[in-house]
Amino acid sequence: MSSMPEARVFHCISVDDTFALGIKIGEASPSGSVISLQGPLGSGKTVLAKGIAVALNIDEPIVSPTFTLVQEYCGTRRLHHMDLYRLEGQEEFESIGGEELLYGDGITVIEWSEKIEALLPPHTINISISINDDQSRTITLRGLRL
């Protein structure tokens, strides 16, 4: 019986560090992964998503899909990038068909995933980001072995 990997904590001093961590996460994430990104505005959620996209050989620029809620990109695996910042709640997410993306192939990255916490599958990779006083980031990763 395999056990859930323990939480790992990373200290990222720069945007480049955060981006590089995103690449490692993308390389280690199996198809079907759901990656939950939580942290305040400007903490680096989209930077991590850009790194994950690079790991999937996606050439398109990754932008935060704040107004469209979901962007889809194709690389070696499909990437669904969601930004739920403007989402009113779980019902709105269900009404746009978001739930089916939680159980698809490829990788689904969800910024502001706390808005749909109850819908996240048990195998969700949880990443929380905090901004330190010196503007570095503390990134805690649960559910993925790096």
Image (cartoon, rainbow, N blue to C red):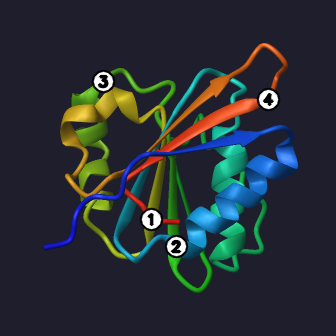
x 35%, y 58%: residue? 5
Mark 3 crowd level (few <14, some 14–19, many ≥20, 10 Å Cα): few
Q: Secondary structure at mark 4?
A: loop
| Location of residue 22 (image quadrant) | bottom right
Q: Is residue 135 above or below residue 35?
A: above
> Which amino acid lies under the numbered mark 4 shown in the image of this protein?
Ser
Q: Secondary structure at mark 3?
A: loop
Do the residues bearing badges 4 and 2 touch, measured as CB atoms within 8 Å? Answer: no
Left or right relative to 35: residue 19:
right
> Which amino acid lies under the numbered mark 1 shown in the image of this protein?
Arg
Q: CA distance from mark 3 to mark 2?
A: 30 Å
Q: CA distance from mark 1 to mark 3?
A: 31 Å
| Coordinates of residue 77 in the picture (x, y in percent) | 52, 81
Q: Is residue 21 above or below residue 91?
A: below
Kindly identify which numbered label has been placed on residue 84: none
Q: Which residue is mark 2?
A: 28
Q: Which residue is mark 1?
A: 145
Kindly identify which numbered label has been placed on residue 136: 4
Q: CA distance from mark 3 to mark 4?
A: 31 Å
Mark 1 crowd level (few <14, some 14–19, many ≥20, 10 Å Cα): some
Do the residues bearing badges 2 and 1 touch, measured as CB atoms within 8 Å? Answer: yes
Most foreground residue, 108 or 133: 133
Q: Which residue is mark 3?
A: 89
> Which amino acid lies under the numbered mark 3 shown in the image of this protein?
Gly
Q: Secondary structure at mark 2?
A: helix
